[in-house]
Amino acid sequence: MPGSPFLPTGRSDVVGRIDELGMFPAPGIRERRVFVWRPPGYDAGTAHPVVYMHDGQNLVDPRTASFGADWQVDEVAAGLIAAGRIPPILVVGAECTAERREEYGEGSAGRAYLRFLVEGLKPLIDARYPTLPGRESTMVMGSSMGGLISFLALYHCGETFGGAGCLSPAFSPGLCAGVADAAWPDRPFRLYLDNGGVGLDAELQPGLEGMLAVLEAKGFRRGKGLDVVVDPAAEHFEDAWAARVWRPLEFLFAAG
């Protein structure tokens, strides 16, 4: 699969500006650091779409990244904006905690994390920044367990989020069965699913195929609010997600 047209060679200082919002408490789960990325040329007089992203420490700065590699979301988003492929967006990054697996999962901690996003974080962001607060301009994105909780955010909180980017999502057979047995909320959405083919991503592929089969049985089709990308050569790592993060950003925020 061709590399990203918006990923620079090597890593640079942060492109755009990061606003540190400090540590945020949330009922039922651990507090966590939150930041907002503003694009180059940010205009405080213009309302912006917003994407809420998990594992915030790994998104824009290799110095804070868990494994020394970031997604380069700042460079990629800035490139997409400069090329006119997406409008200027805000990226809200919430760091993970030691309870990442539980907080990004299908249980009570996951539901508490979703309430944190919807009832705690989003109202604050909408109050502090010029945003487009409607669901059609509010997206959520993450990888692995972060891809799972992004899907759950769209599934359970579709009145808030109009689209989700799920990179290398950790879909369980139980979740696939639960979605198959339940009615999907009747509202438009954009859902991006992808996966690699090496290492852990190869192990996650059956879950992706299972969820895709469920969605297609419900009538969802690629090109109609659903996009699916598989890169057989990609690993389960930040560099691989950096190489393809332009795809969900463009899919979620492009007009039309």
Image (tube, rainbow, N blue to C red):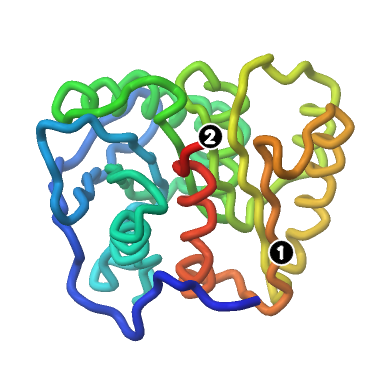
Q: Disc 2 residue type?
A: Gly
Image location (x, y in percent) of residue 153: 53, 30
Task: Please give left or right for residue 98 compared with residue 205 in the image.
Answer: left
Q: Residue at x 77, y 28 (%)?
A: 179
Point out residue 46 in the picture as x, y percentages from the top left corner: 17, 32
Q: Quadrant of residue 25?
A: top left
Residue at 80%, 44% in the rendered image: 212
- Residue placed most toward the observer, 228 or 103: 228
Does 46 sit left or right of 168 as displayed?
A: left
Where disc 2 sits, the SS reads: strand
Q: Position of residue 31 (x, y in %)?
A: 28, 37
Quadrant of image for the N terminus: bottom right
Which residue was labeled with disc 1? 230
* Circles 1 and 2 in contact, beta carbons < 8 Å: no
Identified at 72% across, 20% down, the residue is 184
Is residue 80 or residue 236 the one in the foreground?
80
1 or 2: tag closer to the N-terminus: 2
In this view, the residue in front, 245 or 204, is 245
Q: Is residue 2 above or below residue 172?
A: below
Please tell me in which quadrant of the rendered image residue 51 appears.
top left
Q: Amino acid at mark 1?
A: Val
Q: Residue at x 68, y 14 (%)?
A: 186
- In the image, residue 37 sits, relative to residue 226, either above or below, namely below
Crowding at dot 1, Cα within 10 Å, few <14 / some 14-19 / many 20+, comes out as some
* Figure disc tally: 2
Q: Which of 133 and 175 lies nearest the eye of the viewer? A: 133
* Quarter assignment of residue 199: bottom right
The residue that mark 2 highlights is 163
**Secondary structure category for the residue under label 1:** strand
**Rounded to the nearest whole Å, what is the CA distance between mark 1 and mark 2?**
19 Å
The residue at the far left in this view is 44
Question: What x and y, as percent, mark residue 233?
Answer: 68, 79
